Amino acid sequence: MSTLDTQRVFKAAAIQTGPVLRDAPEWFDVPATVQKAVGLIGEASRNGARLVVFPETWLPSYPYWGYDYSAAPLYRDLWAAYLQNSIVIPGKETEVLCEAARRNDTYVVMGLCERDGHYHGRMYNSILYIAPDGSILGVHRKICNTHMERLFHTTGDGGDNLRTVFETELGYLGGSICGEHSQLALMYNWIMLGVQVHCSLWPGLVGTKNESDICTRSFCWAAHAFGVMSHTYFEEKDLPRDFYKNSYFTNPSAFCGGSGIVGPFGTYVTEPVYDQEAIVYGDIDLHEADKARFAVNLTGVYSRWDILSLRTGDREYRPIGEMGSEGERIRELEARLQDLERVVDGLRAGEQTER
């Protein structure tokens, strides 16, 4: 896609609200949450947004609870409900979201708990990217899960999972999930893939308030990219009263929000909004991203690829493979190494003859 095809100035929207949750034993209301998302996409679009970003695992919910040994039977039911209400891609829920993106002519970036459609019981902390024509651009799965997430989510793998920066009419679009922002090798990978608009997804907890600010702003400065930072926030009236005994829902002050729009110099285009539901808007001007590269440009003159480089896994991980396939690959590499050793020996012999 050429620069002429790129919309250089546009409005982005960060969603700051919560999914629809219920008391035990229902817990999750996916149809209501999907319809809430459709309404928010429509509202943001009517206000001029071409990009709408939702928080981390917003659909059906971030796992705001841990394992309490004194309530183990209920926890097992809750774990199963979380699995059953997680989202298969593609599936009926994503079809509704894709239609909302198409109808509103906007890019939608949704944080969700993804259920693997092939390996039953496997879930991922994922970002779903949807184009304005209603097609799915791709999915990124979080490569390292944090705290309570480890009870549910499988880590994302290599291959296409590390190439989720998409060339769009809004520029190169990518994103990271919460603690991934501390994975500096991953963030460098996004920079080298040319990200210009970075979607930064967070759970909206007080404990991540400083981290989200520091991590998103520092990345945007290093990448000279814009950042759309989206946090969950619950009003007290919307919190379930009887969800699970150690959930964050028992403490309304645990949620603070903090959604905002960051510019390519690491300063805010729109300051973070705290302690309220909101759709946070900000204008993105890719000309400013170009200007920010004048001194420190990691994809250009401010790079040293000759002494510092990054290796990424180019293959997807599969739990089932052909027996001996790895052994065959090792044998192939050993054979190539022996060939190289023979070449080196020949060169050395030639040097000695000349002497």
Image (spheres, rainbow, N blue to C red):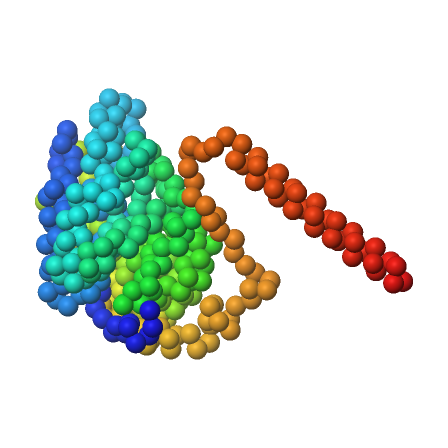
Coordinates of residue 350 in the picture (x, y in percent): 83, 58
Coordinates of residue 222 in the picture (x, y in percent): 42, 65
Q: Quadrant of residue 176?
A: bottom left
Q: Quadrant of residue 79?
A: top left
User: What is the quadrant of the N terminus in the image?
Assistant: bottom left
Q: In this rendering, does residue 270 appear at all? A: yes
Frontmost residue, 158 versus 73: 158
Q: For the point 32% across and 33% down, which residue is it?
A: 119
Coordinates of residue 36 in the picture (x, y in percent): 11, 49
Q: For the point 30% across and 46% down, which residue is it?
A: 126
Q: In the rendered view, would you say 146 is above or below 190?
A: above
User: What is the quadrant of the C terminus in the image?
Assistant: bottom right
Frontmost residue, 249 versus 61: 61
Q: For the point 24% across and 22% down, which residue is it?
A: 73
Q: In the rendered view, would you say 58 is above or below 284?
A: above
In-image side of 191 versus 68 (left or right): right
Coordinates of residue 235 in the picture (x, y in percent): 14, 48
In-image side of 71 versus 322 (left or right): left
In-image side of 339 versus 109 (left or right): right
- The number of numbered discs placed on residues in the rendered structure image is 0
Q: In this rendering, does residue 226 appear at all? A: no
Q: In the rendered view, would you say 1 is above or below 82?
A: below
Q: For the point 51% across and 73% down, which residue is it?
A: 301
In-image side of 230 versus 277 (left or right): right
